[in-house]
Image: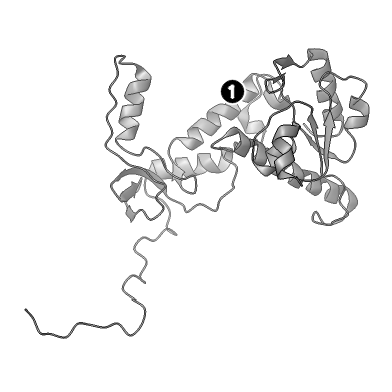
Amino acid sequence: MSSAPSEHRTGPSTRYLKVTHDLSSAPKAAITSSTLSLGEQYILGVYARPPFVLSHGRGSWVWDTENRKFLDFKVSTWSYPIYFYAFSKSHAQQVLREQASTLLHASNVYHNQWAPKLAELIVTLTQQHGGLGFPAGSSPSTTSAKVFFANTGTEANEGALKIARKVGKDRWAAATGCEPDDPACPKTRIVCFENSFHGRSMGALSVTSTEKYQAPFRPLIPDVDVGKLNDHEGLSKLITDDTCVVIVEPVQGEGGVTAADEVWLRALRNGAMRLGLC
């Protein structure tokens, strides 16, 4: 047994102070540049993501499209050599098997090769079919539409409500010359409808106007106006200059299968469009 004295540190380790990968230099691989560019164009910039694109992983290590190796500390990047067995040899099964052998899941804090392509497809098809108020057949290059990816419906609705509040404040500030964060800003009101269900997180719950869900968690977020589905007379009073967003289900499932009347939906949309909400 060695009798040499053990080494004792007198301060923090400085072994890993040197940067291992210089991310400030321009990408060398074409796939890196094209993926970053496509993501910039079609994905909503929620995170300040580092400029590399994850490609594959093994164990605790991941590689990017520049073949740089990173140690994964996030526990949100999964790269398993998984094999799928099923009776059906479908194309979907093949795609899942191939992708699972490289990178099964990665946090959206980082770029990957597929999210920008999916975002581009969503925007392109939405415009081609005249969705979101776009003229049918319009080109994606004519708009700044972007996609916000979410894990659940309630997260998607939370994101939509937050975006609407921010846009409403920005438009009010532009019209009045005031600051968007001025407490006097009135354009914060949210319109929803009775017997709706939009999620269980606080914002989505606040527009889920069902007593049994809301009661245990009050107080909820303020400035929510609740209307009745298919109530034509109430629309004129429901949507006002202070409204920043309208959230509605064309078919309500929580209070029974209740469908919104098409004429009423068109009137609701026209009222929102008059105020620049869509």
Q: Nearer the viewer, residue 167 or 105?
A: 105
Q: Nearer the viewer, residue 132 or 213?
A: 213
In the rendering, at what x and y percent does residue 255 appear? 72, 21
In the rendering, at what x and y percent does residue 224 appear? 81, 39
Q: Is residue 36 left or right of residue 20?
A: right
Which residue corresponds to the image point at 36% horizontal and 60% vertical from the top-left? 21
Q: Nearer the viewer, residue 124 or 214?
A: 214
Q: How many marks?
A: 1
Toward the left, the furthest residue is 1
Quadrant of residue 189 within the rendered picture: top right
Quadrant of residue 247 within the rendered picture: top right
**Secondary structure of residue under mark 1:** helix
On-image quarter of the N terminus: bottom left
In the rendering, at what x and y percent does residue 238 appear? 89, 31
Q: Is residue 40 left or right of residue 222?
A: left
Q: Is residue 29 left or right of residue 142?
A: left
On-image quarter of the C terminus: top right
Q: Is residue 122 among what the camera can see?
A: yes
Q: Is residue 208 among what the camera can see?
A: no
Determine whether 54 is above or below 120 in the image. Answer: below
Report crowding for label 1: few under 14, some 14 to 19, many 20 or more residues within 10 A (C-alpha): some
Determine whether 140 is above or below 263 in the image. Answer: below
Quadrant of residue 123 within the rendered picture: top right
- Residue position for label 1: 125
Determine whether 251 is above or below 4 in the image. Answer: above
Which residue corresponds to the image point at 59% horizontal and 36% vertical from the top-left? 147
Determine whether 218 is above or below 271 in the image. Answer: below
> What colouring does the structure picture have?
one colour
Query: In the rendered structure, which amino acid carries the disc numbered 1?
Result: Leu
In the rendering, at what x and y percent does residue 16 appear? 33, 70
Q: Nearer the viewer, residue 155 or 98?
A: 155
Q: Is residue 72 left or right of residue 218?
A: left
